Amino acid sequence: MCAIEMPDTHKTRDMKNLPELLTCQDGVPVCSAADWMERRRPELVALLAEHEYGVPPEALREGTVSFEAEPEMPLTEQGLRMTLWHCRIAVQGETFEFPFACYRAEDALAMKQPVVLAISAFGDAFWDAELRKGGAFFPARRIVERGYAAIQVKADAWVDERMRALFPARDFGDLAAWAFAAQRVLDWAEQRPELDAGRVSISGCSRAGKAALWAAASDPRFAAVMTNVSGCGGAAVTRGKSGERVAQITGGFPDWFCARYGQYAGREEEMPFDQHFLLAAIAPRPLCIGSAEQDEWADPQAEYAACVLADQAYRVLGLTGLGGAASPTVDVPIVAGRLWYHMRSGTHGLEEFDWTQYLAFCDAFLRG
């Protein structure tokens, strides 16, 4: 028997047939940090890749990657400089690309800085003037003033009909492709002397939050993770969930996941995993999950339930996760350990209150 107790999940949501996090596939319990890191965590990542997200094909992963910058753009009124980069991947006679923007302070250009990286999947946001004024969705100015380089990745720009024609088997979904794009930007950051690639946080909202979680779960180089209202296929446990479930999300957005995930529509209890596996695969790295009280489609109770369950992974590693909080209070963040959670008032989206928590989280874990 192991010393880690199972959480009392009925306090968050009635979940049936929930797969056990701290039991390996051969039935052997996880009792130590070595068991977790060497056996169980790799199993979780493999299960999620096989049944939910998929993995970009080897040909794409071995394609020739290059980066090209446009002329640096001074945002004088903000004291910032923004450089727009293009990542290009050449594979089998095709070239796929996506842009990303890097913001830095004029007076910090010579400094080696930690990074707040966000996946964006909502239009051409980083060319928007409101963004340059520090809008809530990606408040570049506020992030930079806090002492970070701010990077926004326009990851959904490169999953097009040509890519699907080249790789038609649907062995990977758009979320895996967006995660793959963010991982290539991390490759780029490792080559930049002005950036501290060992202190890069990744974030996202809604579908971009799902991609950010998978990017970090499948790539341990990301130092910290922050996601907002990521819901079904993201931070919310699927069993017993209200609002969006597998049938709705695969019916409306079939390309987001690998084809196999759709087979669990109406059969969630048969899945050999649930979303607490995704959150737990990030341990021991710090993780911050944000919900919205009135976001019934994402279901904040199911998101919090996943945090409660994932807390076991931090404890088996000898760390404090949630810190024993019984239940969340609206607009009162839980910040006791390495697994932070907040549920703000309001609806689906990303607001100033969320960024206040995320920047405090970055200060706590990326400054050391």
Image: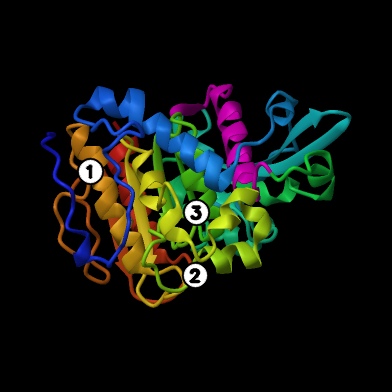
Residue 109's label in the rendered image is: none
Residue 174 lies within the magenta run: yes
Residue type at tag 2:
Glu
Work out whether 357 lies above or below 278.
Answer: below
Quadrant of res 342 = bottom left
| Residue marked by disc 2 | 244
**Residue at the location (49% across, 56% down)?**
233
Where residue 32 appears, x then y in whole percent? 20, 27
Instruction: Assess disc 1: are there few (<14), some (14-19) or many (≥20) residues with their C-alpha within 10 Å of its C-alpha.
Output: many
- Boundaries of the magenta span: 171-198
Q: Residue tagged by mark 1?
A: 312
* Element carrying mark 3: helix
Kindly identify which residue carries mark 3.
209
* Residue found 52% across the figure and 56% down from its top: 138
Q: Residue type at mark 3? A: Gly
The percent coordinates of residue 75 (x first, y second) are 62, 50
